[in-house]
Image (spheres, helix red, strand yellow):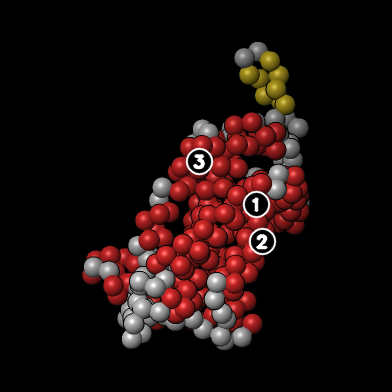
């Protein structure tokens, strides 16, 4: 362990981590366990996270369901719209978890906990990876509860359990990708409140300029084109196909013609890009 001179005092440098990739995986799992235990001790975090998506399901299903017609149908049908809607609600739920991820990391930064982790001989990316993995588990729990609520209001899976599991896998991959955006936001602001605001303000246009609530064919041409190439839309469209739910009129844009592949590619690109930026920010923000 090396010593460095700073303002006349001897300060011990942080020990270097050893063990390579396996050590990084183990450190990440330890941090994930810590965050999961914290969530279990504060159950209101999970409960409040369920309230908003359940409200969206009920409001859109019963308030707007009878007024919005899915293209390809002869008239507005609330049952058809509910099935069209649910993939969008699922995707919105996993992406809105971004705000919670950012707020949690900002809170740890504010309390100095990240600096304590940094002083330990652990992989530099483990703190962020562990946090995002814990958020992924919470998101999966939220999806299970939300799927039960969706079934109660009339949503159904029509193409079998395996395809449905594939759809949920794409949704969780998207949620995990967006949690890295939340991690970067959490490291870039000073307070958890700012992280929450910063994590939500850009999500509303992202989710509403998409095919989540209305088909992109009903939008003005420019917005429709943006919606077709929106990463969020690719996951929604792929989920509808795998669930066997109504799709409406599908655009000729490549992501809408190959939504499952587009969803995976978009999610992996977001993970690689924002994980790199977040780990780099982590090193400089806590140095």
Q: Disc 2 designates what residue?
A: 141
For the N terminus, which image quadrant? top right
What x and y, as percent, mark residue 24? 71, 52
The residue tagged with tag 3: helix, strand or loop?
Answer: helix
Q: Which residue is drawn at 54% across and 76% down?
A: 154
Tell which circle, 2 or 1, labels the residue nearer the N-terminal end.
1
Which residue in the rendered view is the most extreme toward the top? 8
The residue tagged with tag 1: helix, strand or loop?
Answer: helix
Q: In this view, does 128 lie above or below 251?
A: above
The one nearer the camera, 73 or 14, is 73
Residue 251's image quarter? Answer: bottom left
As measured in the structure, the alpha-carbon distance from the residue carrying label 2 to the one carrying label 1 is: 9 Å
Q: Disc 3 designates what residue?
A: 195
Q: Disc 1 designates what residue?
A: 46
Task: Left or right? Give the position of 144 relative to 92.
Answer: right
Closer mark to the observer between disc 1 and disc 3: 1
What x and y, as percent, mark residue 32? 71, 51
The one nearer the camera, 3 or 282, is 282
Closer mark to the observer between disc 2 and disc 3: 2
């Amino acid at each position: 362990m090396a010593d460095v001179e700073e303002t006349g005092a001897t300060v011990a440098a942080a020990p270097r981590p050893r063990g390579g990739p396996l050590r990084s995986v183990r450190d990440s799992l330890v941090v994930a366990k810590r965050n999961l235990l914290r969530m279990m001790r504060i159950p209101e975090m999970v409960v409040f996270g369920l309230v908003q998506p359940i409200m969206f399901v009920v409001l859109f299903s019963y308030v707007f369901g009878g007024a919005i017609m899915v293209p390809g149908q002869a008239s507005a049908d609330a049952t058809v719209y509910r099935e069209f809607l649910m993939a969008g609600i699922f995707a919105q739920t996993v992406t809105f978890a971004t705000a919670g991820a950012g707020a949690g990391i900002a809170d740890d930064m504010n309390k100095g906990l990240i600096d304590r982790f940094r002083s330990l001989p652990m992989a530099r990316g483990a703190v962020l990876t562990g946090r995002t993995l814990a958020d992924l588990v919470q998101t999966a729990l939220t999806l299970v509860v939300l799927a039960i609520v969706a079934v109660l209001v009339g949503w159904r899976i029509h193409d079998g359990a395996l395809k449905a599991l594939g759809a949920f896998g794409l949704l969780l991959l998207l949620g995990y990708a967006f949690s890295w955006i939340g991690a970067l936001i959490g490291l870039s602001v000073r307070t958890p409140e700012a992280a929450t605001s910063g994590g939500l303000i850009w999500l509303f246009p992202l989710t509403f300029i998409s095919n989540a609530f209305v088909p992109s064919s009903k939008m003005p041409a420019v917005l429709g084109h943006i919606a077709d190439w929106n990463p969020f839309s690719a996951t929604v469209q792929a989920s509808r196909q795998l669930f066997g739910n109504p799709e409406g009129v599908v655009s000729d844009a490549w992501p809408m013609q190959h939504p499952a592949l587009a969803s995976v590619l978009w999610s992996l690109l977001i993970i690689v890009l924002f994980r790199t930026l977040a780990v780099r920010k982590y090193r400089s923000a806590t140095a």
